[in-house]
Amino acid sequence: MNRLADYLSLHLLRNTALRNVALRHRLAGALLLLALLPLATSSLIGYAESTAAVRQRSGALATEVVKLVAKNIGLEMARLESDSEVLVLSDRIQDFLGDYAGTDEAKRAASRLALPRALLERYGSFDFLNQKYLLDRDSRIIDAQVFATLGDGVAQFARRAPNHFGRPYWGTYDNAAGQKSMVLLRAIYNKPANQLVGSLFLGVRPSHFAATFDDVNLGGGSAVFVLDADAGKVVIDPAERSGGAAPAAALTAELRRSRQRSGLAGYSDARQGQHLLAYAQVLDTSWFVVGVIPASQLATEAQSVRDKNVLIGMAALLVSIALALILARSITTPLASLAQAMRGIGSGSGGGNDASGVTLDGNDELTALARQFNDMAGRIEQHQLRLERRVGEGSGELAAVKARLAARSVTDDLTGIANRRRFDEVLAGELAHAARAGVPVALLMLDVDFFRHYNEAYGHRQGDDCLRRIGALLQSHARRASDLAARSGGAQFVLIAFDTDSAGALALGEAIRAALEALRLVHARSPLGRVTASIGVVSVVPDDTWSFAAMLRMADQAMVRAKERGRNQVVGARAKDTA
Ligand SMILES: Nc1nc2c(ncn2[C@@H]2O[C@H](COP(=O)(O)OP(=O)(O)OP(=O)(O)O)[C@@H](O)[C@H]2O)c(=O)[nH]1
């Protein structure tokens, strides 16, 4: 897994734009992604669920509310029922109804007058009852004052009312004058005979029930009312809106379809759009308490939940951006100072901003790295100092060695005076110099006489000593800085004398010869009895045509002639020697 991650991050992305993005931006991006992914996911889920949650919560609430309203209406109805029961079971009403059902015309007439009065005495003070009648066995109103049309309507209502198994029946009734009533219809039996003697018709104003829930509110745009599913119309509406609280037909269809006593449904209204519908049946009636909430209101509530979510999300995003930046900088800043310190080492200006190197507080890997780096920088610095010291010492030694080598390359090992190489260099230089200056330069060539015999007679070591003494002698005759005495090979020496003409050169040669002879170095095998030398001398004012080799040849020829003439003498070069 790690290897795969390494491969993806280091190799696959090597040449992509990502590798060109600064480290702190990449780190911040990674941290942001970590923070954003769960945030975005939860926001999406929250967004999707908020509508459903609001709908469910509102629906549950509305269902509870309508159930409560239905229960309260039911309780009020039960109160009216029990009150009416007390009335119809009273001896007075029972007796009057018994008389009315009898055959005694006088009693019938008296009870016809007494029954409405008894009813009025009982219910006359209740405003909410807009109709109160006692009906005979044939459902005719027992009241001579009542108009025929009204009487017919009530009689029809009573006859059509379903048998309610001895319990009161509740229905709705609109009379000819346009009055709406919630009607309690109670059958009255003669107690002793258990015989149906008539019924009680009590019309309750809808507003009486409406008062039990007119302050119930399910939110803006919503409505609570009572619908008669049998009649397909709104029967109690506290708001008393014109045209009904809602399209009764659509709601009725929905209630009939669901066949539940209470529940939640949706319905669509072409005029007002989508609605949520909560309903609860009033016990033992075809009435339903209905709560209607427009979907637009739910959407508004859901939107406010979402707005809150978005606000919280934005705040969390800002916090995570700030944290990501802080975290990224906490990594990249120490790295940057490490990199700067490394650049410092690379350019030779030290391990850090100051002598103590990189200073990082903390206990993390970067601090450990900085500590190791400081150690390493310190060691490198020590090492560098040691190296510099050794190079310094070495360069002194080297210069001495070089000087020694240089000196050795131009010095004759045996005699310590200049060697043939040095002689060649100097002679060439002097010739050029003299040519420029237009002055003579002289060359003396000295060869020790019978030296082979000397070696043979005294040994090679003494021969060396002899050569050393001759070298020193010659050196002592090189008086000017530009003069040079050199051993040109074997028992042969040369002397260059600048600005010296032929006469001067001959005189110098003679001085050398005499000085050697004056040393009185015994040479038994020489006819001369001591160490002597033959010297060839040449002096020229050189021009560009003069070569070094030609001058050597002339001196050599002069020296050979000195040998031929008997040795131990100085001979000057002749003009023909130049040929
Ligand atoms: N001891 C010693 N002898 C050397 C050295 N270099 C050359 N010789 C000897 O010097 C001698 C030079 O001999 P030549 O110049 O040929 O002849 P010569 O015996 O000097 O006689 P003439 O030059 O004819 O007078 C040789 O015997 C060499 O061996 C040296 O460094 N030390």
Image (cartoon, rainbow, N blue to C red):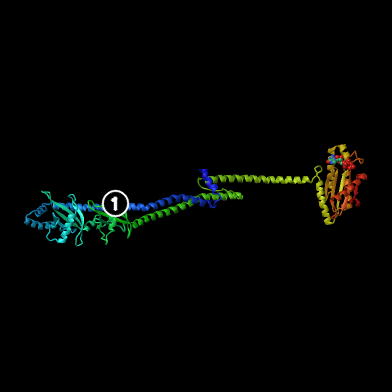
Residue 149 coordinates in the image, percent (x, y)? 16, 61
Check disc 1 and report the residue beneath it: 258
Horizontal placement of 406 versus 158: left or right?
A: right
Numbered disc total: 1
Horizontal placement of 565 versus 371: left or right?
A: right
Q: Mark 1 near ligand 1 (CB under 8 Å)?
A: no
Residue nearer the viewer, 483 or 97: 97
Ligand 1 is found in the corner quadrant, namely top right
- Identified by mark 1, the residue type is Ser
Residue 180 coordinates in the image, percent (x, y)? 21, 59
Is any atom of residue 82 visible in this view?
Answer: yes
Residue nearer the viewer, 260 or 47: 260
- 112 versus 397 height, above or below: below
Is any atom of residue 520 visible in this view?
Answer: no
Residue 456 coordinates in the image, percent (x, y)? 87, 37
- Within 10 Å of the Cα at label 1, are there few (<14), some (14-19), or many (20+) other Cα atoms? few
Residue 17 coordinates in the image, percent (x, y)? 54, 52
SS label for mark 1: helix
Horizontal placement of 283 versus 44: left or right?
A: left
Residue nearer the viewer, 577 or 320: 320
Horizontal placement of 200 versus 435: left or right?
A: left
